[in-house]
Image (cartoon, rainbow, N blue to C red):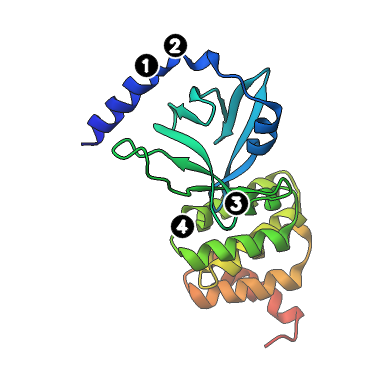
Amino acid sequence: MKFKVLSRLLLVAIGLMSCSGNVEFTEAFKKKTEGKYKYTEDELILVYYEENKLKLKWKEGVFEPVVTDTNEFFVADMYKKLRFVTEPGSNNRYLSIVNEENQDSISYDYLKVAESYKTPSTHLEEGNYEAALTGFLKIKEKDSTSSYIREWDFNNKGYRYLRNKEYDKAIEVFKINLTLHPNSSNVYDSLADAYVRSGDSLNAYINYKEASKRNSDNRRAREYINAYKPKDSIQ
C-alpha cells in the first residue's frame, strides 16, 4: 500500500514539473506565506522565495518543490503534496498535507509561527538554557519517549563541550539532561565529571554521591567520594 502511494506521488511530481515554472507569486502572497512553520516540537520548515521561486529549508537541507499552482506544491523529499491554508476563526496559517484520496479535505498540519519563534534545540545552541529546558519539558510532557529528549544525545553534546574545554556549556547541558532524566546514574556521573574538569570539587562530590546511590558499581564515583570525604564535612 505504501509503495502504491509513493509511486502515485512520484507520478504526480513528474506530471507537475512541466508546469512548475509558470507560476507567478505576487508580493502580497509571498509576504503572507513566507516564514517559519512548525514541523514538530523541535523542527521547523522555513518557507521563502528567491527570484520568484518557492524554496523550503527543512532538516538541514534546502529544497525547491514542484509547484502545481500558486497555493500547492509537491516536496519529493517529504513524499508529500502541501498547500497553504488559513484556519477559519483563528486566522492561523498552516501548511496542509494534501490527501490524494480526497483532495478537497483540509487538514491543519504545520502551524506558521512568529519569526521570533525558536525551537528548544535552537535555544540550547544559543545558550538560552532556561528557555531550552522549558521547551524540552513540554516535549517530555507530551511524549516521555520522544527522540528529541534522548539522554544519550544530551550526554554526547555535553561531552563535545568538555572536549573543547567549554565547561560552563557542558554543565548547563548536563543539568538539562538531569532535569529530563532525574533517575539516571549516568547523568549525575557526567555532571560530576564536568564539575571536576571545571575545578568545582564540591559539586563534583555532590553529584558523584548521587550517581553512586543509583549505581553502587560506579567505581569512578566511589573513588572520588572516598578521596574527597576526609576533606569535607558533608554527611
Reading the image, the residue beneath label 2 is 18
Q: CA distance from mark 1 to mark 4?
A: 37 Å
SS for tag 3? loop
- Look at the picture and state if 166 lies above or below 222: above
Q: Amino acid at mark 3?
A: Asn
SS for tag 2? loop
Could you tell whether 195 is left or right of 182 in the image?
right
Q: CA distance from mark 3 to mark 1?
A: 31 Å
- Look at the picture and state if 35 lies above or below 68: below
Reading the image, the residue beneath label 3 is 92
Residue 163 visible to an observer of this rendering: yes
Q: Residue at x 58, y 66 (%)?
A: 137
Reading the image, the residue beneath label 1 is 15
In the figure, residue 27 lies in which quadrant?
top right
Considering only order in the chain, which callout, 2 or 3, is on the residue closer to the N terminus? 2
Q: Residues within 10 Å of mark 3 (few under 14, many from 20)?
A: few
Return the residue nearer the eye: 83 or 207. Answer: 83
Return the residue nearer the eye: 163 or 119. Answer: 119
Reading the image, the residue beneath label 4 is 146
